[in-house]
Image: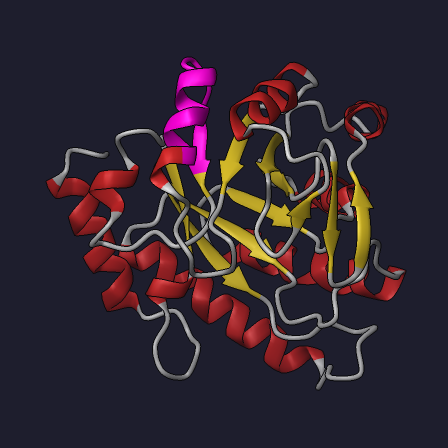
Amino acid sequence: MRFIGMVHLRTLPGYPQHKGMEDVVRIALADAIALQEGGADAILLENTYDDPHQKTVGPETVAAMTLVAQRIRDTVGLPLGICMLWNDYKASLGIARAVGAQFVRIPVFTEAVLTSSGMIEGNPYDAITYRNSIGANGVRILADVHVKHSTVLSQRPIGDSAREALSFGADEVIITGKFTGDAPDLAKLRAVREACPMALICVGSGTTPENVADLARYADRFIVGTCLKNSKDLVDVEKVKSFRRRLDELGLK
């Protein structure tokens, strides 16, 4: 699983920008099908357009995302991941358990960060305990370290933070740039690899066909979204194919 393609959901119920589930489902399915046809290895479903993001979401948002996730599972054969922003890991794990998704992304698994939605504190004990309590032990946790769109309050070296996230139960770590679409700093990515030589490391933002060779020196997987979109903000199957070809050229099967 090298290439995880993003399905960025249009605004879900619970937010004033929501325009109905028909468009949400239609666009999500079209993006998921394009990712599968283009050669992605997996899909990550995220409530990207639920602005401003909340620390935890309401039941109507969880229900809507579960519906979309199930429709994708019924339509597309790729492994599926769930990320409920800002940091509602219980919603992510619950949806994953309900629909049979294989992994979740937790933006703040350890430490504390300052975001536009306020301060968010990681709670790895609660995340792991909750996963076990709902019988979702097989759902992998991909944990961001010094996640984008935030300021880490501890200011610890990123390698130390990554090592701690893994020791507290994360199955993999995700390294991002400063914002969506920004690639991580190679020096920071290298620091994580040096601190965690046996870990699975995923780049969580900013990967493109042009920079993937450099990122692959230190990373194992790539969550890709921005560079796969067309001018209408939809996944372009030809751009997915182009990224897949680039991985294949580099021997990154």
Q: From this viewpoint, which residue is outermost toward the left?
A: 249
The total number of labels drawn is: 0
Q: Is residue 40 left or right of residue 225?
A: left
Whether residue 1 can be seen here: no
Give me the residue at 36% from left, 83% from top: 231
Give me the residue at 42% from left, 75% from top: 234
Q: Quadrant of the C terminus?
A: top left
Place of residue 29 in the rendered image (x, y in percent of width and height, measured from the top left): 50, 67
Q: Quadrant of the N terminus?
A: top left
Q: Is residue 60 above or below residue 192?
A: below
Does the magenta segment cover residue 178? no
Give me the residue at 42% from left, 13% from top: 198
- The segment highlighted magenta reads 188-202
Q: Is residue 123 left or right of residue 189?
A: right
Place of residue 7 in the rendered image (x, y in percent of width and height, measured from the top left): 51, 61
Does the magenta segment cover residue 197? yes
Q: Quadrant of residue 252?
A: top left
Q: Is residue 83 above or below residue 12?
A: above
Give me the residue at 60% from left, 67% from top: 9
